[in-house]
Image (spheres, rainbow, N blue to C red):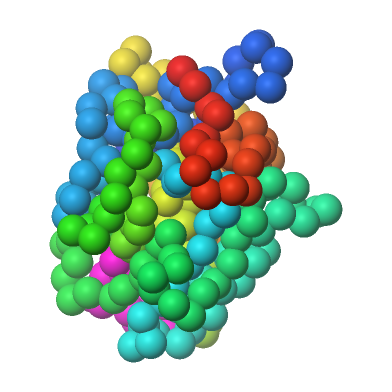
Amino acid sequence: MKHRLSAILAIGALYLMSAPGVVSAKNWGAGVPPKQADRCTIQDEDSQCTAQNGTHTVWVLSSVNSDLKAAITASVENDYDDSSSNNTDINASMVSDPGAADVWVFEKDDAVANRWGYGTCTSDSTFGESGLNEWCRPQAIFFNNDHESEWEDDAHPEKRRWVTCHELGHTLGLRHPNDVDQNGNYLESSNRTSSCMYTGVGGSTWPGNLYSYDREHLRDCYPHHTIGDPPQCRD
């Protein structure tokens, strides 16, 4: 969703509160901070939703650039699927059947000017929950063909790693760690440039993986792997 190369949109991060086992939804979930307006919507480049549960499946249209598809697959397996080293409590995988997918991936000519990609709900989506926990399924990610040369650039694979990890994170409700609240304060006070959800990319700064606060958020908000169990993260 919504990525300008210099200072892209603001959409969230993770802010841990003192209540045991609960992550604040202040900087996570559906809607756009700081007002948290309802933006889990259809065909909206600024849509932001959560996922239905901790089982997250991704389908990629066959015509999508092969290097980009490989980066998406690697991110699903290495960033989001639970493992002893990754520890996300998410059961993430690629699927060949769009009917079985939580996320559909496409490329689109000039998807949104100056944006590398965005995610949104579709006319085929169903919705559930409300407020910060609102989800839609499937969600669609559109990568902008105007920037395809970036994913094809073998000299800079870090750009593919960043954009794929970033867009997939939005489909699970993760936001930008350099977003600000209504008082102008960063929602993540430190290590903002260490997460692929960071938006101030450029130069040598292309973080290609989740950071520990991202993974902790996923563990706390998606403790179930059964369809029908909504996220347990509450404001």
Q: Is residue 111 left or right of residue 191?
A: left
Q: Residue at x 59, y 67 (%)?
A: 93
Q: State the predominant SS element of the stretch in magenta.
A: helix
Q: Residue at x 41, y 62 (%)?
A: 103
- Quadrant hosting residue 112: bottom left
Q: Position of residue 67 (x, y in %)?
A: 48, 84
- Does the stretch in magenta take in 168? no
- Does the stretch in magenta take in 150? yes
Q: Residue at x 45, y 87 (%)?
A: 66
Q: Is residue 95 or residue 49 the one in the foreground?
A: 95
Q: Which residues are magenta?
A: 142-152
Q: Residue at x 29, y 66 (%)?
A: 142
Q: Position of residue 12 (x, y in %)?
A: 42, 34
Q: Name, please, the residue furthest toward the right.
A: 84
Q: Position of residue 29 (x, y in %)?
A: 41, 34
Q: Is residue 44 visible?
A: yes
Q: Is residue 82 left or right of residue 194?
A: right
Q: Position of residue 91 (x, y in %)?
A: 64, 56
